[in-house]
Image: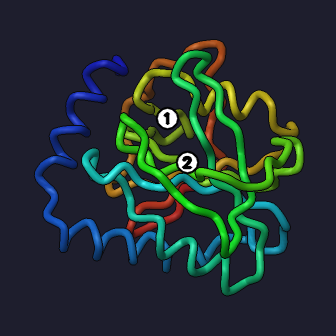
Amino acid sequence: MEKKKLRKKYKELRANLSEDQIDTKSLSIANTSLELDIWDYEYYHIFLPIVKQKEVDTSYMLNILQGKDKHILVSKSDFTTHQMKHYLLTDSTRFIVNDYGIPEPENGIEIDPKKIDVVFMPLLAYDLQGNRVGYGKGFYDRFLSECKKEVIKVGLSFFEPEVREIRKNDTDLPLNYCISERKVYKY
């Protein structure tokens, strides 16, 4: 299926979610994540949600990671180069919301992407083969290409997968897992 159509479809589906639905679904996704066998690693990258895009609220996932004493990394995006830098989340990390509505660390200790073991990723749509559709800027594809080959890629979605396979580009890297509120999909 064409990515442009999927972006439109899932942006509309998200737009119809209430704040209560987002909160309930986000909590369910976090609880479902506990079924995964990924909690013995050290470095975890997590996205912070763009509220106006009605993304999965990752605060519940953050609580799980903090409760397990993991090293948590958050990103800062450069919209000129479409690259991301990754910073260790600490008690002193201060955040600002950039012009695109993305909460980003204002300061912090930069960490090499090669250290990252698990990446929790935003997405708009995904399929039964582990292909994902993001916003189309390629930030995560570039980021993942900088990570070690065995990095575990975990998508988070309010919705179930597309049954029809999503067309992919040569630079697209498939997910290892995607977590919906009802199920973990393994690839």
- Residue 76: quadrant of the picture: top right
Identify which residue, 183 or 169, lies in the foreground. Answer: 169
- Image marks 2 and 1: residues in contact by CB distance under 8 Å: yes
Assess disc 1: are there few (<14), some (14-19) or many (≥20) residues with their C-alpha within 10 Å of its C-alpha: many
Residue 157 drawn above or below residue 142: below
Q: Amino acid at mark 2?
A: Met
Residue 177 showing in the rendered view: no
Residue 52 drawn above or below residue 83: below
Please report whichever mark, 2 or 1, sits nearer to the chain's N-terminal start. 2
Identify which residue, 113 or 132, lies in the foreground. Answer: 113
**Element on which disc 2 rests:** strand
Residue positioned 44% across, 69% down in the render: 29
Give the label on residue 132, or none. Answer: 1
Give the label on residue 179, or none. Answer: none
**Element on which disc 1 rests:** strand
Identify which residue, 68 or 165, lies in the foreground. Answer: 68
Q: Which residue is mark 2?
A: 121
Using residue 153 as the reference point, say whether residue 136 is left or right of it: left
Residue positioned 85% across, 43% down in the render: 112
Residue 172, position as x, y percentages in the image: 61, 23
Q: Amino acid at mark 1?
A: Arg
Residue positioned 37% across, 69% down in the render: 26
- Residue 49: quadrant of the picture: bottom left
Considering the image in quadrants, where does the N terminus appear? top left
Residue positioned 52% across, 63% down in the render: 184
Residue 163, position as x, y percentages in the image: 37, 38
- Of labels 2 and 1, the one closer to you: 2
Identify which residue, 77 or 130, lies in the foreground. Answer: 77
